[in-house]
Image (cartoon, rainbow, N blue to C red):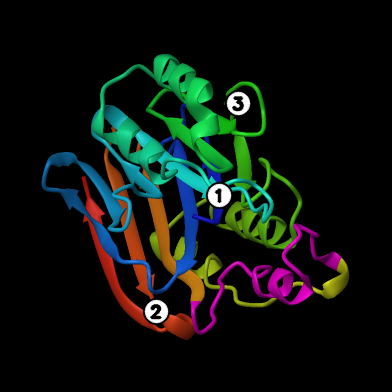
Amino acid sequence: MCLIVFAWRPGHAQPLIVAANRDEFYARPTLSLASWPEAPHVHAGRDLEAGGTWIGVGANGRFAALTNIRDPHQPAGRKSRGELVARFLGGDMPIDDYLDDVVGRSLEYAGFNLLIGNANELWHFNARESEAVLLPAGVYGVSNAGLDTPWPKLLKARAALETVLEDPQPEALLALLSDSQTAAFADLPDTGVGLATEALLSSVFIASQSYGTRASTALIVHADGTRHMVERSFGPYGGHLGEVEIRI
């Protein structure tokens, strides 16, 4: 998952609104959003190469999502980052205990941002930092750096999210995730991958022959605990492969 914008609004009729794009090589085998056979209370896509996931919901209001930190010089992790989301969604460990465990083992993974929460709280942990942060109400974004790092794609998507919060609908959330306009060269971050790649990765929606946005996910959580998720899947050059909608 490479871009997540979200509104955290405790006490609101819709306390959590999320719009997220997962960017990955098209060749990496993946299953679309579904209930997991071995854990029917988990609803998420699945990375078939390592078994984890990038965004999903679980029992008792659990929510988790992940982005990678872009750093071509970082060592490869011994474990797949996607297991951090899967393990939280499929388990029942209290959030505090789970975060303590993640912080203690964060060096086993390449760099990541982790969002986890339930109906009452939402936390962010960046593996380059020493502790997790309990998020106050607000509108946020995270891509492949820190929380709210002002990359052009994050600023654009977060601003677009703010315009639809009065009446958030999945279609509007998915529309803001479909923006394929790249940033001006002068506005690109320098993450060590070269100017051409920085430009390719600078759009909210990425499309190329081998790498791009594989899934766009809209999540609306209601105060009564019900959740509405829509996921659109894509192939090379942004070709639309299908859509899954669940209400739980």
| Residue 109 x/y as whole percent | 50, 39
Label 2 or label 1, whichever comes before in sequence order: 1
Relative to 244, is 20 above or below?
above
Horizontal side of 219 relative to 133 (left or right) equals: left
Q: Is residue 193 magenta?
A: yes
Dots 2 and 1: beta carbons under 8 Å? no
Q: Main secondary structure of the magenta part?
A: loop
The three-letter code of the residue at mark 1 reads: Asn
| Classed neighbour count for the residue bearing mark 1: other residues with Cα under 10 Å, few (<14), some (14–19), many (≥20) | many
Q: Which residues are magenta?
A: 187-210
Q: Quadrant of residue 147?
A: top right
Within the image, what quadrant is residue 58 found in? top left
Give the residue furthest to the right: 186
- Kindly identify the amino acid type of the residue bearing the numbered disc 3: Pro
- Give, as a three-letter code, the residue at label 2: Gly
Give me the C-alpha separation between circle 3 and circle 2: 36 Å
Q: Please say if the residues under marks 3 and 1 sit with CB atoms less than 8 Å apart.
A: no
> What is the x, y in percent for residue 99?
47, 22
Q: What numbered label is drawn on residue 136?
A: 3
Q: Residue at x 51, y 20 (%)?
A: 104
User: What residue do we see at 36% from left, 40% from top?
Assistant: 83
**Residue 171 in magenta stretch:** no
Give x and y (percent) for residue 64.
Answer: 40, 38
- Give the alpha-carbon distance from disc 3 to disc 1, as whole Å: 23 Å
Residue 122 appears in view: no
Q: Is residue 114 left or right of residue 64?
A: right
Q: Nearer the viewer, residue 235 or 229?
A: 235
Q: Secondary structure at mark 3?
A: loop
Residue identified by numbered label 2:
235
- Secondary-structure class at tag 1: strand
